[in-house]
Image (cartoon, rainbow, N blue to C red):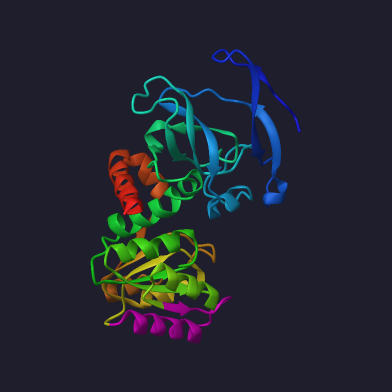
Amino acid sequence: MRKIARKSKKEGHEFAMKAMMSHAPGGPETLELTEVETPEPGPGQLRIAVKAAGVNFPDTLIIRDLYQFKPPRPFAPGGEVAGIIEAVGDGVSDFAVGDRVLSGGINGGFATHFIADAARSYKIPDAMPFDEAAGFMLTYGTSHYALKDRANVQPGEALFILGAAGGVGAAAIELGKAMGAKIVAGVSSDEKAAFCKDLGADETLVYPTGALERPAQKELSGAIKALCGGEGANVVYDAVGGDYAEPSVRALAWNGRYLVVGFPAGIPKIPLNLTLLKSCQIIGVFWGAFTMREPAKNADYVAELFQFYKD
């Protein structure tokens, strides 16, 4: 472990922060706890003393160089934190030292301190503990944006969720239910199905794992339609991809919406003639980019999410 300390002009003593650093591509076993210089916030930024950090699927990708963004090494992974503001940069007026906040970014969260953009930081409700706050925004923010903004889910519609027991999938169950949708949760095991039922799913579907040949894909599509009722799913929330994508599109009802949330099972190839036959939409969901491109709208959505939490 290498320590790089410096003199803090503001506090008058030497200190270094600790961070789990990625020096080479690999799994979590390659991360090293290292002491590095504690950064100062720039204009429009905050320095947060991290009390809790969320662990999400993108964190496992970024340290293996499999994420769409590849930070220069060495870097600390971690895209979601909660803590207390201990310094503010120039031009910041909505936050003060001592505020309890959550924030995020591409990386940097697995550390004792995190430099955050004020525009992507939010004061957390008094009743929300730090550990819940640190795991709240990426999962619920993604799913809220997907269901409300991208798919415009309406009461009574059938929502099929692939990967429903994962972080974003579980959030989609709760939010979809709050929006009045019929929830059909697609999972890979009976244990996960029981978990989704406890969250409020109306129906569950245990799909086969591994490569799906054409007969298995047709069977899956038929099962989705049967559980959704009517013509099929009005909305598909796909956080899995791979061989599960095409059967899910085939299970869409007329004017259905297929949400591309993630594809850990592989980037799928979907015949575009299906969009014509069903008059359906294939819609990408990139919540992180949305927060940067439309911060005011995102702030309104965050306020809605905090209200959901309080209720």
The C terminus lies in quadrant:
bottom left
Left or right, residue 64 beside residue 142: right
In the image, residue 145 sits, relative to residue 251, either above or below, namely above
Q: Is residue 228 magenta?
A: yes
State left or right for residue 278 relative to residue 11.
left
Q: Position of residue 219 (x, y in %)?
A: 45, 86
| Identity of the residue drawn at 54% across and 36% down | 50
Residue 282 in sight: no
Residue sitting at the far right: 1
| Residue 224 coordinates in the image, percent (x, y) | 39, 80
Question: Residue 127's spot in the image, x, y percent?
Answer: 40, 45
Q: Locate residue 250, reporting x and y percent.
A: 37, 77
Q: Is residue 238 magenta?
A: no
The residue nearer to you, when weighing 305 against 221, is 305
Indicate left or right for 114 with 150 as reference. right
Find the magenta span and give its range. Answer: 204-229
Who is closer to the viewer here, 174 or 130?
130
Q: How many marks?
A: 0
Q: Quadrant of the N terminus?
A: top right
Q: Residue at x 38, y 57 (%)?
A: 143
Does 86 appear above or below 195? above
Residue beneath the point at 26% across and 67% down = 180
Residue 227 appears in the rendering: yes
From the viewer's side, name the closer residue of 166 and 248.
166
- The vertical placement of 252 against 289, above or below, is below
